[in-house]
């Protein structure tokens, strides 16, 4: 990450700095909960807008794909134009896009608004870490960084509860739309506070934005994901889907070649000389695909298959959301220093066991399938995820020089968002193509959705097995500090 300077004002301190930190953390929280909270309201949203399975996948994947494609560009724009200016533009755009989501009259408009929402999030989120660097001296950053890291656990915990609560609250008969409209006043508050509290800063040296790289990566990913998601509405794979997939792979290969030649690449290709980076990104991709796919299809199984209310289904996923931050803290602080990459390996095995328990419980499900049948698998799966998430990041960036730490972290987060998009596409499509044939009686719905859920989980377990094999590319144990010059 490029060095930053504070222009025309001293580093803020005291109460003003604390309020500024709360402001940028609020923006980060709105982004994180924007994924977890929407999962829970997909079934009522589908019924209201008459959305197809592919629309449901695009509502989630469109956001994460736009975020992934735009995040590195957002960081570069902050360096070029000023972190405060880009942050305010991002959060204001996020508020406007959230309002558009709430006003969407059809699924196509909602997908477009979600893509815009993801692009705006990609502009604001990179500025959060930049502002922390500006406002806090190196020795003071531990607390703010820990608070930023804890937001993902908080969003995972509150999302399954806040979504159903807003549905039941149903102010002005808004229903699921309230999930999006609630962002508008909170984001507007962040805009006003940011204009007053945040310092002006920009990078001392910043390279130009790689527009060709942005275009190639966006086009390649869209060409790959579009046929995967569209397949959810089809019984087969027409010729055009294979042509589209092939063209996407060609465009992505051209993107890699371009990034190796351009002076100021969008992705720092030199990072791939480290075995730990290659292995860690591969594990993260293979691990996060089934994770994000599970969240979406499990909510559909609970609400459409078992007829659970949004609140009951949200409470069903709560043990997972609680287990993740607890086990992440224990694993990073206690297990990783002692047993190294075995922490991640054990976590993948535990998560696979949780998926297997849920798959066994959902195979041949009946309308009476409920909490006692599913809770142990959900709890074990969440514990496994917690054992993976925090240690994997540290092991992936273990060999990256300090000077490239910002680029490495941005690359890791980009892969995470891409995996989320692919997970919704692949696992979602696998699920939807197996849930057909129900006659809409309670027994048929429970069994049809349950068998499709189980099939998607066995596919997820296979992906976790490949992720386990890839963990041997990671360092055995983390080193005390990264290599200064990458040697």
Image (spheres, grey):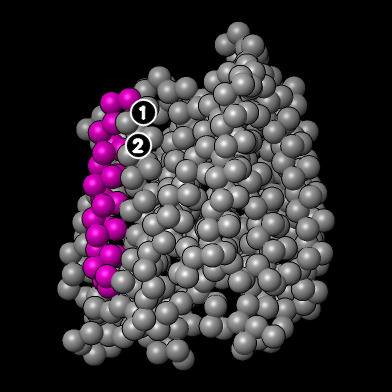
How far apart are labels 2 and 1 at the CA level?
6 Å
Residue 78, numbered circle: none
The residue at the point 48 percent across, 53 percent down is 68
Q: Is residue 101 magenta?
A: yes
Q: x, y (%) of residue 92?
A: 23, 55
Q: Residues within 10 Å of mark 2 (few under 14, many from 20)?
A: some
* Residue 249 against residue 405 in the figure, above or below: above
Q: Is residue 441 left or right of residue 100?
A: right
Residue pointed to by mark 1: 108
Pick the front one: 122 or 242: 242
| Residue 214 higher or lower than 326, as above or below | above
- In the picture, the quarter occupied by the C terminus is bottom right
Question: Is 278 in the magenta?
Answer: no
Q: Which residue is drawn at the image coordinates 50% and 74% (left, top)? A: 406
Count of number-bearing discs: 2
Q: Is residue 311 visible?
A: no
Q: Name the residue tied to disc 2.
A: 112
Boundaries of the magenta span:
81-106
Q: Main secondary structure of the magenta part?
A: helix
- For the point 22% across and 52% down, which residue is it? 185
Q: Position of residue 149 (x, y in %)?
A: 50, 68
The residue positioned 24% from the left and 90% from the top of the image is: 10
Q: Is residue 93 above or below residue 456?
A: below
| Residue 14: % across, % down | 27, 87
- 341 to the left or right of 96: right
Residue 192 seen in this snapshot: yes
């Amino acid at each position: 990450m490029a060095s930053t300077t504070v222009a025309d004002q001293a580093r803020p301190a005291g109460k003003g700095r604390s309020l500024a930190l709360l402001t940028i953390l609020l923006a980060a929280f709105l982004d994180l909960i924007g994924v977890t909270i929407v999962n829970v309201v997909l079934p009522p949203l589908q019924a209201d807008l008459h959305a197809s399975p592919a629309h449901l996948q695009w509502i989630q994947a469109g956001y994460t794909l736009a975020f992934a494609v735009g995040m590195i560009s957002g960081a570069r724009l902050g360096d070029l134009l000023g972190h405060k200016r880009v942050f305010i533009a991002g959060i204001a755009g996020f508020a406007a896009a959230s309002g558009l989501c709430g006003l969407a009259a059809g699924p196509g408009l909602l997908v477009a608004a979600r893509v815009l929402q993801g692009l705006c999030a990609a502009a604001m989120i990179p500025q959060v870490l930049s502002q922390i660097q500006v406002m806090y001296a190196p020795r003071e950053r531990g607390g703010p960084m820990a608070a930023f890291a804890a937001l993902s656990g908080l969003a995972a915990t509150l999302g399954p509860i806040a979504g159903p609560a807003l549905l039941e609250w149903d102010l002005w008969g808004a229903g699921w739309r309230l999930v999006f409209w609630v962002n508008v006043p909170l984001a507007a508050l962040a805009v006003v506070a940011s204009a007053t509290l945040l310092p002006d800063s920009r990078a001392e040296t910043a390279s130009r934005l790689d527009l060709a790289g942005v275009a190639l990566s966006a086009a390649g990913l869209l060409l790959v994901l579009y046929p995967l998601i569209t397949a959810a509405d089809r019984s087969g794979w027409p010729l055009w889907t294979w042509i589209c997939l092939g063209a996407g792979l060609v465009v992505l290969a051209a993107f890699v070649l371009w990034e190796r030649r351009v002076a100021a690449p969008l992705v720092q290709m030199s990072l791939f000389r480290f075995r730990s980076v290659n292995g860690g990104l591969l594990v993260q991709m293979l691990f996060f695909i089934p994770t994000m796919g599970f969240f979406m299809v499990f909510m559909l199984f609970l609400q459409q298959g078992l007829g659970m209310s949004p609140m009951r289904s949200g409470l069903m996923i709560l043990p997972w959301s609680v287990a993740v931050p607890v086990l992440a803290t224990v694993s990073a602080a206690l297990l990783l220093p002692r047993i190294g990459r075995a922490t991640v390996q054990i976590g993948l095995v535990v998560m696979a066991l949780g998926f297997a328990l849920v798959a066994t419980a959902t195979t041949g499900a009946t309308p009476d399938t409920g909490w006692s049948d599913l809770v142990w698998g959900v709890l074990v799966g969440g514990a496994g995820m917690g054992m993976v998430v925090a240690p994997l990041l540290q092991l992936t960036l273990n060999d990256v020089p300090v000077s490239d730490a910002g680029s490495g972290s941005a690359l890791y987060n980009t892969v995470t968002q891409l995996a989320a998009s692919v997970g919704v596409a692949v696992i979602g499509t696998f699920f939807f193509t197996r849930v057909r044939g129900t006659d809409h009686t309670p027994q048929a719905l429970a069994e049809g959705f349950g068998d499709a859920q189980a099939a998607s989980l066995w596919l997820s377990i296979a992906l976790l097995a490949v992720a386990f094999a890839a963990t041997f590319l990671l360092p055995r144990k983390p080193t005390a500090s990264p290599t200064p010059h990458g040697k």
